[in-house]
Image (tube, helix red, strand yellow):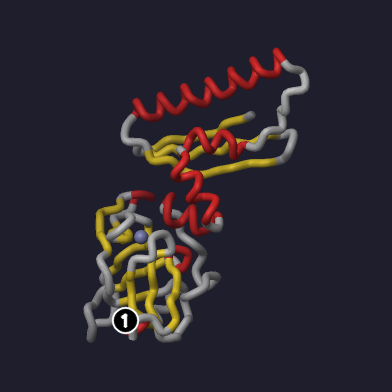
Amino acid sequence: MFIIFSSENAELTYCLFRVSKFEKVCGNIRLKDKIGIFALLCILCMVHIVECHEISLNPDFDTHQSPYDILYILEGEEKHKLRESLSSLQFEVTQNDFTEPPYRNDYYDLKDKGDYKCVICGHNLFKSDTKYDSGSGWPSFYEPDGEVVERPDTSSNRNRTEVVCGNCGAHLGHLFKDGPEDKTGMRYCINSASLKFDKGGSE
Ligand SMILES: [Zn+2]
């Protein structure tokens, strides 16, 4: 087992992989403070020590166990179940603030009438009536339909406003002030991976 990590602003990026099976798992964990990072490193050391102990007791011990077993310890049961219920892109976007590629996503040019709901909890987020072509390559709306929460985001050394689901806190995207001036002037730039489209919706 190898672990590569870097930490910045109490956000830990980890990468676990086993050379023997060419498997790897990478991701981010947000920890509130340095004590959390220290605790995490202790857990990883314990996992490694237990594994070595098992091998010494039983030469037939499966040393090819998946890194996902270690992720289970890192993430906890609830988040691990969520990972299994979503695509890897949906998980990374909604839980680790990843941004999907522009133009190569499901809804950026969708013009059908309907409701855009949170892919995690089904909360109503946006209506197709407020969707417009921003040319950004991501679904863009000039106003939300349901409750969303806007909060400062200083990651990547930029001052932006993050938008998350008002019900479950899933990361949705960012808010910019370059939306259509004849509407609200706002652009809710949202990842398709955070959304589930309900064609027809409540209209
Ligand atoms: Zn939600």
Question: Which residue shows up at 44% across the image and 85% down it?
Answer: 111
Residue 173 % position (x, y)? 37, 62
Question: Which residue shows up at 64% across the image and 15% down it?
Answer: 53
Residue 167 % position (x, y)? 29, 59
Please indicate whether residue 86 sits to the left or right of residue 172 in the image. right
How many marks can you see?
Answer: 1
Please indicate whether residue 62 sits to the left or right of residue 156 in the image. right
Question: Which residue shows up at 33% across the image and 74% down it?
Answer: 126
Decide if ligand 1 comes within 8 Å of the CB at mark 1: no
Residue situated furthest right in the rendering: 60
The N terminus, quarter of image? top right
Where 104 falls versus 29 (above or below)?
A: below
Where 148 falls versus 156 (above or below)?
A: below
Residue 104 % position (x, y)? 55, 70
Question: Which residue shows up at 37% across the image and 56% down it?
Answer: 170
Residue matched to label 1: 130
Which kind of residue does numbered mark 1 sit on? Thr
Q: Quadrant of residue 12?
A: top left
Q: Nearer the viewer, residue 203 or 105?
A: 203
Residue 46 % position (x, y)? 53, 20
Q: Nearer the viewer, residue 196 or 8?
A: 196
User: Is disc 1 surrounded by few (<14), some (14 to 19) or many (20+) residues within 10 Å?
Assistant: few
Ligand 1 visible in quadrant: bottom left
Q: Quadrant of residue 162?
A: bottom left
